[in-house]
Image: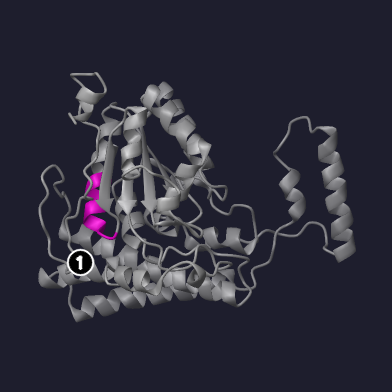
Amino acid sequence: MGNAAHDLGQPDAPPLLPPRQPVQLLDERGVFHEVEGYPLDLEERDLHDLYRFMVLARHLDRQAINLQRQGQLAVYPSLYGQEAAQVGAAYALDAKDWVFPSHRDLGIALVRGVDPSRILHLYRGTWLSDHDPYERRFMLISIPVGTQTLHAVGFAMGARLDGADLVVLSSFGEGAISEGDAHEAMNFAAVYQAPCVFFVQNNHYAISVPLEKQTKAPTIAHKAIGYGMPGYRCDGNDVLATYAVTRRAVARARRGEGPSLVEAVTYRMEAHTTADDPSRYQPASELATWSARDPIARLEMFLRAEGMLDDALHAEIDGEARDHAARLRAEVYDAPHGDPRELFEHVYADPPERFAEQRALLERELAATAVPAGGNRAG
């Protein structure tokens, strides 16, 4: 088989087919290996930041699971095992760029500077959304699978028409590839050269459905060629590789060369959500294999070998993460709920008749449960 440009009948087009092996800069022992085309522009402070964000994400993730078990959150989707994928991708963005996240992207939110308690209020049901998207350029959490891809492309096209110098990253899991929304978004973005990066966290399971039952493509990144854009693959448990590969895709979009698809190959070490029982479909041997590829341990081994991390700094970072987790707990635990009537505000300039009917139904339900009017939202 010829190269991708030849296959497409475009002799001057760049190759689009991804390699079968994901780009990896840190192996499982934490040893660094250079890979042509993926240079690192990170200083020691950046490496410390990457490590801090990953440790923080894991501590907050565990606190969120504990809060759900104690009845403080309705549900929570863990990111355990995917810290490197999320932190590496988010770190590859500039402050002016935007993120359209999935429901599992607490790690990306942390890098963007979003208060984690604002995210957890969504899962507590305290409020529909509790952060200002414009403050950190981190859009509202998307619960429906794949719909954020369409929103991201629309925003990216609007930015391009406005002449704004920004890139939009749309983050989603491999399960969204089975949804029509993602395909429509990628095709539209490629045709109109939207400054967008489609970042797929391939954690191998869409709830209980394994990847091999979702697609017959060699890899998810191979799907990109069908839209006429490049597909990249990285070891999603390697924060340096994820950063380097995503940074390359971001730079391409910023130059006006259009969208890319980045597949970060990782693994979901926890349940799909706290309402799920992964023991029914995830083999113990598979969990053991991926546990040995822990993304935080891998970076820690590298930093220690390079003399960038000692016991004192390790203890400092761990202590900071524990303090953040305690503050998160204090913010969320028994937080008061807002007034559900506000769901009807700022929706229609001229509400349809069914809107009044729905509001009346809510009023009857609230009256029956003695919820007072004018409740205050948290925060």
Q: In this rendering, is residue 25 above or below 172?
A: below
Going by the image, does 358 lie left or right of 280? right
Image location (x, y in percent) of residue 220? 35, 44
Which residue is label 1 attached to? 28
State whether residue 192 appears in this view.
Answer: no
Q: Residue at x 43, y 63 (%)?
A: 79
Q: Quadrant of the C terminus?
A: bottom right
Image location (x, y in percent) of residue 223? 35, 37
Q: In this rendering, is residue 269 above or below 86?
A: below
Q: In this rendering, is residue 255 above or below 316?
A: above
Q: Does 243 lie within the magenta span?
A: yes
Q: Quadrant of the N terminus?
A: top left
Q: In this rendering, is residue 304 above or below 259?
A: below
Q: Secondary structure at mark 1?
A: loop
Over which residues does the magenta segment extend?
237-246
State whether residue 336 appears in this view.
Answer: yes
Q: Does 358 lie within the magenta span?
A: no
Image location (x, y in percent) of residue 335? 64, 68
Q: Residue at x 44, y 26 (%)?
A: 188
Q: Nearer the viewer, residue 269 or 42?
A: 269
Image location (x, y in percent) of residue 47? 21, 61
Q: Report the amino acid beneath label 1.
A: Glu
Asked where in the image residue 353 lies, by quadrant, the reply is top right
Going by the image, does 103 lie left or right of 295? right
Q: Residue at x 65, y 73 (%)?
A: 334
